[in-house]
Amino acid sequence: FFQYNWHCKISPLFMISEYFNHLVQKTKMSANTTSSLKDFELQLSFLGRNVLDEEAFNALLDNIGYKRSREGLFESLLNDVASAGVDSVEEKKALGSRRFVTVEDIAKMYGSDPYHIFDNGEDAGVSLMAYVDKMFHKSDDNGDGVITKDEFRAFFYEVVGPAFKNYEADEAFDIIDVHKSGAITLAQFKEGILKPNKNKSSGLPRTFNHNLISPTVTTSDEFVSALERYTKNHRAVSHHLLENIACASFGKKNTADVILLFLSAYAKFNSGFVERVQKLINFLDNPKERDVLLENVKEEMGFYDEKTLQECDAMGIPRKSVDSVPHHQLFLELVKTIERKVKCSYFDYIPEDLNEEMVQIQNELTKKGKIGLLASLYFGSELIVPYIYSSLLVGLRLCLNITHEESRFLLLHVSMDSDHAENIRDIIVTHCKTAEDRIELVKCTEKVLNGRVAFYDRLVSFNNLQSLNVNVSKLYDNQATKWSREKPSLLSDFTGRPIVYDLIREHVEGACVIDVGCGEGFVSRTMTKMGAKKVVGIDVSPGMINCAKVHPNKGVNEFFLVGDASGLKQNLIDQWSSCNIMLGENFDVGTFDLGVAVFLFNYMSISSMNKTFEDVHSVLKPGGHFVFSVPHPFMASHNTSAFGFNSNNDSTYFALRDKCLEGHIARIDGDKLNVRMHFKTIEDYINAATSNGFEIISFTEARVRAEDMVNNISFFSAINGHPLHIVIKVRKPVSAFSALSLSSMNTLDILPKKLNWPRTLTNNIENSLVMWLPPAVNDELIFASLQVYEKGITVDNLNIGNDITAQPSDRCKSGERVMPETFSAIKAFATNVRNRLLHETGAVVIKGLDMSALGGAGQLDKMTACSKIAYFLICEHIGKVDATARGRLFDVKSANIDAMSKMPDNVLVSVSDSDVGWHTDGASKDRTYDVVSLLCISPAAEGGKIKLSNACDVYDELNRALPKFLMYELTRVIPRDILENGGGKGIVGAADALSRSADILAMRIRYNSYPIYRVEGDRMRFRYMRHWIETGHEKTFWKVPTFLRIAMDILDDHLDEACCFHQALERGDMIFANNAMLAHARDQFKNEPDAPPRHKVRAWIQVQKVAIANKTEIEGGLDPFEKKSGLSRVESLTNMVLNESR
């Protein structure tokens, strides 16, 4: 094409543009690659050329200010072109003799290694997983789905060679065989080989702000206040059953019946309250705390002070009816009163499973001891009971006109439990000073609140005379073959699913999709036809999943899992190897571009639906869309031959919530399939989406269309004009700073704002970066460090808030009392440092730590241990120390290894004494660090100076100086070498040797690819280490592309020119650098034989989430999870009850 048009003398620029468009369509280039190729074409026109020959190449280098040697550089580019996308020997010979490069050549280069694997829609992670799949099945000689020890040995020696012994191969087998079963499954094999950076779940609810757990971020009182707000917003307080009871939505008779059922089932749970309080008393050592709880027990037994009895008089409750009468007896009298009024009793007819879960949870929390009991008694009872009992009380008054005396049990708890709650709250504040205790408290609170929600759900189900665990799986297993289809045949295939397809059409091309409640895979297969790159379907029915897996038209990139949608994320984690999902921070940020749930939520309770929405939000990428369809609530009261549900027409709209309605849907062949609908209001769907962080994009009511009536009037006429389904499209916000995301977002979620340096900073670097420790900060650090050291506690197991006690100390220069929970001076100083790191200078050098007070050089071991503790305290107050890869603190000492050479494998540059070029810390795609920091314990005798350069300033300069096709090299994804977690001193053990064998390591490195610069508007992240880029290419058997080499040369030169800090740290100095904005480097150093060797201590710190938490939660005084302004409905209801009663 090129030669033909040249011969015909068509305008060169027109010819290139036409061919360019042809290439873009043929290779399916990304927008970035297309822009780069266009720019290359444009640069040729600037140079007055049609092709890039050596003269034009040198002119280009002159224009960009390239200062390095050019020897062999053009030859290298010709080599890149000659080895890219060439199909024949003749073509290779022709290219080998040619001395110029065309646009076509660059397009082919972009379509070949090492460019294309990341840019043509192929998922490197999927390729890696598929490769390991093949290895597993090849090693599984007998095809039984597991690898035995003998099979593993054969595989091991084939991969790593004969250098290792049998016992070493067996050690690797035992490491991978985590269950010690004597056989390795595919999932274990993948995990052992690939070593995914799985982030261990904290187990905390996603809607609670995880950043508040650290005692260095919040005081105990602030933490408890946040957990209180979370509790009051929980569905345990605002459940639709309580609202329906308070409004008598079931009708007076039925509402009274529901309340009686509620209290009768609640009796078993309520009867154990005093026993739990007494057990808590036994766990407490403080006499005052024990006395407070004993006072609560006395009131529970009916012994009140005069003030309480006077309040009873004011409410019209005779004293004698409450004085000396235990609360449990008052409770039983209330139940008897209601039984007399409704002429019914449930005590002998309550099934065990109605309150079983709530009772089990209470028993479980009791066994956990102090923290479990505090969560149960305060957050699960005293704090929320006034709101719950207010709903019951209002409902009883509406239905039975119950008097104050008859309802005295409820009134006493509505009015008195606030005092009880305050007393227990004070105890909680003193017992949640450590992060561990806070985590346990939140977990226990969530458990007891969910237990109440489960109780309400079961009550609703029991009241509707249905089993809560209606077996949806069995329903669909029995009909699986009837659901299987390849073309539209169900009513909803014509009326509902087409709307779903229309709403996803603009997002599905090239997308990774999660199909929640996928059934037999009909929608999944349709989305594959629409251009989806990968579809993962999950369904609770094994029969339906089996149909999806064996369907003849199943695509190779369709994966189907059996699992409950309400546990979507955990199912994906547990079955990650079965659907080729790579775990790590990229999974936590979001794996899927698009999600669908076609007629799923009608099979779930409102509670389960909310859990599913939460998980879908979590697994979608920021900006990802979710489209779901459900039967229209209108159809609950309309049953036609084609579609409908059987409901009690006497039930009101809101009273139907969560009632399970049996129904049917017709096929065009006349057959009918059984379906179900857990009734929900439209508000329930909207709230489930918005409360879990989604934005509503569109809302559609589906009906029979004109074309359907024309094509098959007999089939559609029965439901013509009815609103059949609702289809809603929502989006996960692009911004990571939405309130819901604060809890679970990680450093990959948060693209920081660019931080440029003004000239005044670079010209006055000493004044700009250095901060001296104030005396009060030194005092707190010295006191805490010495106290911890004398207790024999090291920095690795230090528990802030537990290991440092508040008491006067003669070691503190000021002689003042130190309060370790808040460390007020350290906290104020650290906040200032964090602000500088994120918003001002991006780097801080801290001087003035009194190392002599910590032991000094004469007691080197003591000084080292104590200074590490002091350093950790500062780091932990600045942010959260990331201990996932190398532990809390990493000793930076020379191991006499030249880490910058190409020979050693898996060696950190920090254990070398050689020059280390410009870089940021962290080589893993799945893990980044906000701040890198160093403490100097012993400086080098010579050299070892640290350099800093602002990568934001350099980016802006390069963006002006370089053509786009060279900037593309700095912004496209690039493979990096992989460093295993641990000491970073080479390959350790046979398991490492296996994971780092040539072919496996090459595939892992292909996955471990990300850009040097990631820029979105005014936000940016810089991630660079030239050494790991070069060794990464080498280990994937790729040559570093010439354009990338030129771009990195220019980048390094500009970082050199922008360097304004070049200093060695002195003993006790600490340096902190923003790892997303600044590049750092280090000179070669030497140690003297008779002096302590150079010893630095490194910490990686995550600061952005802490900064956001402080700004929104503490400084602003507002909880970002507080969804309502003013009093909530339940609080208003409680206030109304109290005011009316008084």
Image: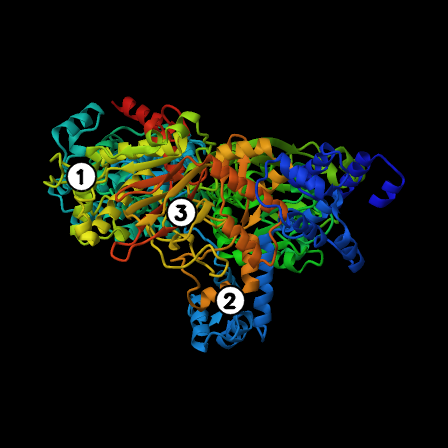
Residue at left 45%, top 39%? Answer: 1076
Camera sees residue 984: yes
Quarter occupied by the C terminus? top left
| Mark 2 element type | loop
Q: Identify residue for label 2.
A: 185
Along the line of sight, which residue is nearer the eye, 980 or 655? 980
Q: Nearer the viewer, residue 56 or 656?
A: 56
Q: Nearer the viewer, residue 251 or 623?
A: 623
Circle nearer the N terminus (1, 2) = 2
Looking at numbered disc 1 in the image, what kind of residue is underneath it? Asn
Which is in the foreground here, disc 2 or disc 3? 3
Callout 2 amino acid: Thr
Q: Amino acid at mark 3?
A: Asp
Check the picture and name the quadrant holding the N terminus: top right
- Label 3 packing within 10 angstroms: few (<14), some (14-19), many (20+): some
Q: Residue at x 47, y 50 (%)?
A: 923
- Check contact, mark 2 vs mark 3: CB within 8 A: no
